[in-house]
Amino acid sequence: MDAYRRHREMSKQSRRQGFYLAPSRKQGKGIALCDLKTMVSEQWLDRTYERQLVLYFRNSSKLILAGTDYADGLRGKAANLILCDEFAYVSDMHEM
C-alpha cells in the first residue's frame, strides 16, 4: 500500500501533520480508522482519539481523518501529507 509507505515516511520526522481525506467524515472513520489502527505499530502511537479521528504519534506528529463534506473544518491547517480516498466521489472540489 503506497499510502501506508508515505505515512510511514512522514511519521519518522517529528512534528508533522497529515490528513486522510474521504468524501465524508463518517466514511473516513468507516474506511480507514480500523485499518490504520491495525497497520500502525503500537510502538509508534502515543494515543488515539476515536471521537476526534486523530492518531497521535510518539514523535509529536499526528494524522487527522477528515471528510471533504465539511471543507471549512480544514481551512487554515497546514499538512505535510494528504492522503485522498475515494476522491472521485467528492461533491465539490472548488470548496476545497
Image (spheres, helix red, strand yellow):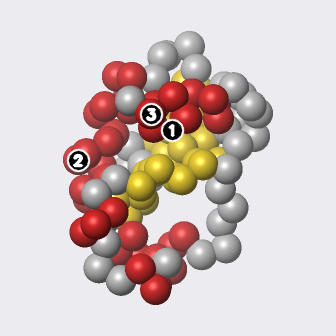
Q: Regarding mark 1 in the picture, which secondary structure is present there?
A: strand
Q: Is residue 25 left or right of residue 84?
A: left
Q: Is residue 40 left or right of residue 29?
A: right
* Viewer-closest of 81 and 36: 81
Q: What crowding class fits label 2: few (fewer than 14 Cα within 10 Å), some (14-19), or many (20 or more)?
A: few
The disc, 3 or 1, on the residue closer to the chain's N-terminal end is 3
The disc, 3 or 2, on the residue closer to the chain's N-terminal end is 3
| Numbered badge on residue 55 | 1
Q: Amino acid at mark 2?
A: Gly
Between tags 3 and 1, which lies in front?
3
Q: Amino acid at mark 3?
A: Asp
Is residue 47 visible in the rendered image? The answer is no
Q: Residue shown at 38%/30% (left/top)? A: 1
Q: What's the CA distance linking mark 1 and mark 2?
A: 15 Å
* Viewer-closest of 74 and 54: 74
Q: Position of residue 16 (x, y in %)?
A: 70, 43
Circles 3 and 1: CB distance less than 8 Å?
no
Q: Position of residue 89 (x, y in %)?
A: 25, 69
Q: Amino acid at mark 1?
A: Leu
